[in-house]
Image (spheres, helix red, strand yellow):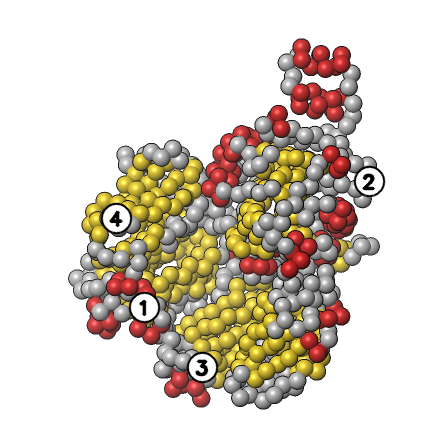
């Protein structure tokens, strides 16, 4: 180094790191911002000239590996700082509340990023608009050749390499993905984590390229593509669509597995994309971790099953039929495996077999299968399954539209915009330039009416979804318009054609076939089930790559005992009459149709919404006097809730119930709390009915601050017999002390805190700030045993609104004390 320069920077008062940054800029090195805080830990590295090398001085940094199990918690968040959605303090509060090891911010600038680093006391590295924070000092920082940053640090004596990216969805994005894979492959660390805004969904060409080296971690939590949405965080069904593009990866060889995580519906919205966090567990010795069965899908016919694994498989071993053995468990017919086919997703294997007996239990036993690294599955790995008879006729469109009633142009095709049948030769899809295409089929259940009325039957239903996509450019980048979505919707109907219950998959948008399935208790009185396939499109863009459906499945599951659930008591619960019939309205609330972009319904019919800027209320009063004996014996509960959303996260909505005595005086209440989430979110609670209750008010409340709407759909309140549902642990005499996590968390205007008391106790529930100062006492009295809830409005004991930040709430009794952390964001 030129010592004259060294003396100059000392005279000017520069620190040594400041001098290095000045030196880089002065001599035309990269203009990237690369900082690590505190500055005396700084390590600034040059950008490599080759896309096939890691940046930095690899030979100067020791890679530590000590073969100990390691747990790492990461957060990724696109803040869109130039849109001024959030403040550094709000982001810092979120980071501190989650207690993460690493954070990646995208669309961030240096002023914002430095403030977040200062507020969280984390180490910072940045390049372009990507900022990477670590709770431990960096040992190495690497600029990326794409928009992104990579840094190394040591956790628990091991080197962890973390990447934060923000890349495009088009041809350039595919090229970026290829560069990233080359970089990952040359990274000598055994633990690599990649987070960020990838601007593309799982199964796209771009993400498929990345998965050559990395694995999409969120699949460990059962999150299917587009089942949960990260982008945008507001403005749904307006100028944008709904996609899952903020992703988390780890290198396959590390055998890291996500054990917990969340796509956060923040209220208020503080970012362009929803924050995504995950906790990844890395084993001490990844060479001992072979593939495992994730699930078996038996929803085809009695000669086909599908196996999902948690890792990419070696194709040769996965297609060897001698590695599969099917064993009858309860005297079913013997079954042989005739063929094993590995699908487009290298974690899926389809077995073609001799016929199974319906409703008999079988066990699949595996051996000899290895992952792509040659590590074998545990010998004798097994899983049980049952194949049930599909009551859907023409479930895979092999007979055209036969047995289906269609409207809006549902089509039967053999291929559509790079999508091909999942099984067989054809599939269902929406027609070009139709806003809503629908196919429906009614399934007669009269032959099972006695079992249904006794509560002994449930419905198992399933459907494979996909969306067509456009191919762009020479390298075949995939483009999926986020407006075209598929939904599988069911109505359970009585003999008078009254809808007793509704169930929906919500809408899906994925570039490769993915199944949605669940089990729903069939309410007493049901005589038929009506199935709907709905393909939605926003036609304003003029493009068509409609939702596709294949292998629609509906079967009956015989239960060992009564499920204890009755039918929905609400009249017109999803505004299916196209008006507010059955509801008492205070203020301006109306029913809206699906054509309105800002509020497409969940149900496919209509929804409740405010009409302009307003505060409004709608309710139904339900008579529960016929259940008085069960209520007073504390053996009756209600399952209640529904779907709720607004448009931008500005307006508040709430679902609540009030328990009334014979004089119509309120005994108690339960609430979702004020919700401000710009996506359909499902709220489903089960609450013990207090002694003395004779009627219940089901209430919708909204406070619309802009003409953008608060929406409700698929609302429900269902009587539940505790004695037959298996939730007897909720009876007061069996309650243990517990303090539950508040909901929502983070929150804006109010949050609900629930707790349980094992017996009559003197109770204190106190809110503390992060310094340990008591700011509010919510409960300070003697209470009877059982389940309790209280709402905190974010105010102190003087009624003053407290600032955003982390708070603690502590429940104390003579026998029990517990504390949880919560986050308030303004």
- Residue assigned mark 1: 728
- Please report contact status of discs 4 and 3: CB closer than 8 Å, yes or no: no
Q: Report how far apart the C-alphas of labels 1 and 3 lie in the structure.
A: 22 Å
Q: What is the quadrant of the N terminus in the image?
A: top right
- Secondary element type, mark 2: loop
- The structure residue drawn at horizontal position 63% and vertical position 39%, both measured from the top left corner, is 153
Q: Position of residue 660 (x, y in %)?
A: 23, 61
- Toward which corner of the image does residue 82 lie, by quadrant? top right
- Secondary element type, mark 1: helix
Residue lying at the far top of the rendered structure: 11
Residue 336 is labelled as none
Foreground of the two, 507 or 519: 519
- Secondary element type, mark 4: loop
Instruction: Return the disc, 1 or 3, that comes first in the chain's sequence.
Output: 3
Q: How many marks?
A: 4
Quick check: 41 left or right of 531? right
Q: Position of residue 694 (x, y in %)?
A: 22, 66
- Please report contact status of discs 2 and 4: CB closer than 8 Å, yes or no: no
Crowd around label 2: few <14 · some 14–19 · many ≥20 (10 Å): few
- Secondary element type, mark 3: strand
- Of badges 1 and 3, nearer the viewer stands 1
Foreground of the two, 261 or 403: 261
Instruction: Return the disc, 2 or 4, that comes first in the chain's sequence.
Output: 2
- Residue assigned mark 2: 50
- The structure residue drawn at horizontal position 24% and vertical position 48%, both measured from the top left corner, is 814
- Toward which corner of the image does residue 767 lie, by quadrant? top left
Q: Report how far apart the C-alphas of labels 4 and 3 lie in the structure.
A: 44 Å
Residue 558 is labelled as 3
- Residue assigned mark 4: 813
- Of badges 1 and 4, nearer the viewer stands 4
């Amino acid at each position: 180094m030129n010592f004259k320069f060294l003396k100059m920077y000392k005279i000017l008062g520069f620190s040594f790191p400041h001098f290095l940054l000045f030196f880089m800029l002065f001599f035309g090195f990269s203009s990237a911002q690369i900082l690590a805080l505190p500055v005396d830990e700084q390590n600034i590295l040059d950008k490599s000239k080759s896309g096939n090398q890691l940046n930095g001085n690899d030979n100067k940094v020791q890679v530590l590996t000590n073969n100990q199990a390691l747990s790492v918690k990461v957060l990724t968040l696109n803040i869109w700082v130039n849109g001024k959605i959030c403040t550094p303090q709000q982001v810092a509060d979120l980071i501190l509340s989650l207690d993460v090891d690493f954070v990646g911010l995208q669309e961030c600038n240096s002023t914002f990023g430095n403030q977040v680093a200062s507020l969280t006391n984390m180490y910072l590295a940045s390049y372009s608009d990507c900022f990477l924070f670590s709770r431990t000092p960096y040992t190495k920082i690497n600029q990326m050749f794409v928009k992104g940053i990579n840094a190394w640090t040591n956790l628990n004596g091991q080197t962890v390499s973390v990447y934060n990216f923000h890349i495009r969805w088009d041809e350039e994005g595919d090229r970026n993905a290829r560069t990233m894979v080359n970089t990952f492959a040359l990274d000598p660390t055994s633990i690599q984590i990649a987070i960020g805004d990838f601007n593309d969904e799982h199964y796209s060409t771009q993400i498929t390229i990345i998965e050559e080296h990395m694995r999409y971690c969120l699949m460990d939590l059962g999150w299917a593509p587009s089942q949960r949405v990260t982008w945008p965080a507001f403005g749904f069904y307006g100028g944008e669509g709904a996609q899952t593009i903020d992703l988390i990866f780890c290198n396959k060889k590390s055998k890291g597995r996500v054990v917990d995580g969340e796509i956060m519906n923040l209220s208020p919205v503080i970012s362009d994309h929803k924050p995504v966090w995950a906790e990844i567990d890395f084993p001490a010795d990844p060479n001992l971790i072979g593939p495992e069965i994730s699930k078996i899908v038996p929803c085809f016919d009695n000669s086909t099953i599908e196996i999902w694994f948690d890792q990419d498989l070696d194709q040769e071993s996965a297609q060897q039929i001698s590695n599969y053995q099917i064993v009858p468990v309860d005297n079913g017919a013997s079954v042989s495996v005739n063929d094993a086919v590995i699908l487009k997703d290298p974690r899926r294997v389809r077995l073609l077999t001799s016929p199974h007996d319906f409703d008999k239990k079988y066990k699949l036993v595996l051996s000899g299968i290895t992952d792509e690294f040659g590590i074998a599955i545990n010998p004798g790995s097994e899983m049980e399954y049952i194949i049930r008879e599909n009551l859907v006729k023409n479930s895979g469109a092999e007979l055209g539209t036969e047995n289906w009633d269609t409207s809006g142009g549902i089509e039967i095709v053999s291929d559509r915009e790079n999508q091909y049948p999942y099984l067989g030769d054809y599939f269902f899809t929406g027609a070009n330039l139709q806003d809503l295409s629908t196919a429906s089929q009614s399934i007669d259940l009269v032959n099972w009416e006695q079992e249904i009325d006794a509560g002994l039957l449930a419905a198992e239903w399933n459907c494979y979804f996909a969306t067509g996509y456009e191919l762009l450019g020479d390298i075949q980048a995939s483009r999926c318009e986020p407006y075209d979505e598929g939904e599988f919707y069911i109505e359970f109907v009585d003999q008078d054609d009254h809808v007793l219950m509704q169930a929906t998959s919500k809408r899906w948008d994925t570039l490769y076939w993915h199944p949605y399935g669940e089990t729903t208790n069939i309410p007493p009185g049901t005589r038929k089930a009506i199935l709907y396939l709905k393909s939605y499109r926003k036609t304003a863009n003029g493009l068509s790559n409609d939702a596709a459906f294949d292998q629609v499945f509906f079967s009956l599951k015989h239960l060992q005992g009564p499920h204890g659930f009755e039918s929905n008591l609400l009249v017109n619960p999803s505004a299916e009459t196209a008006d507010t019939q059955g509801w008492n309205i205070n203020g301006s609330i109306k029913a809206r149709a699906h054509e309105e972009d800002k509020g497409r319904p969940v149900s496919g019919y209509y929804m409740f919404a405010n009409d302009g800027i307003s505060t409004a209320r709608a309710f139904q009063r339900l008579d529960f006097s016929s259940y008085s004996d069960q209520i007073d014996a504390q053996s009756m509960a209600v399952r209640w809730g529904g779907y709720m959303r607004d448009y931008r996260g500005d307006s508040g909505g709430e679902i609540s119930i009030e328990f009334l005595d014979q004089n119509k005086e309120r005994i108690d209440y339960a609430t979702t709390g004020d919700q401000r989430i710009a996506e359909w979110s499902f709220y489903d609670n089960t609450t013990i009915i207090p002694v003395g209750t004779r009627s219940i008010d089901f209430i919708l409340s909204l406070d619309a601050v802009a003409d953008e709407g608060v929406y409700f759909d698929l609302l429900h309140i269902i009587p539940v017999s505790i004695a037959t549902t298996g939730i007897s642990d909720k009876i007061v005499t069996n309650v243990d002390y517990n303090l539950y996590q508040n909901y929502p968390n983070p929150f804006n205007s109010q949050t609900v805190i629930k707790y349980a008391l094992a017996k009559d106790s003197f109770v204190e529930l106190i809110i503390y700030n992060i310094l340990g100062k008591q700011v509010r006492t919510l409960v300070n009295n003697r209470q009877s045993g059982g389940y309790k809830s209280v709402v905190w409005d974010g105010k102190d004991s003087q009624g003053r609104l407290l600032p955003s930040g982390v708070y603690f709430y502590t429940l104390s009794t003579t026998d029990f004390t517990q504390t949880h952390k919560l986050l308030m964001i303004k």
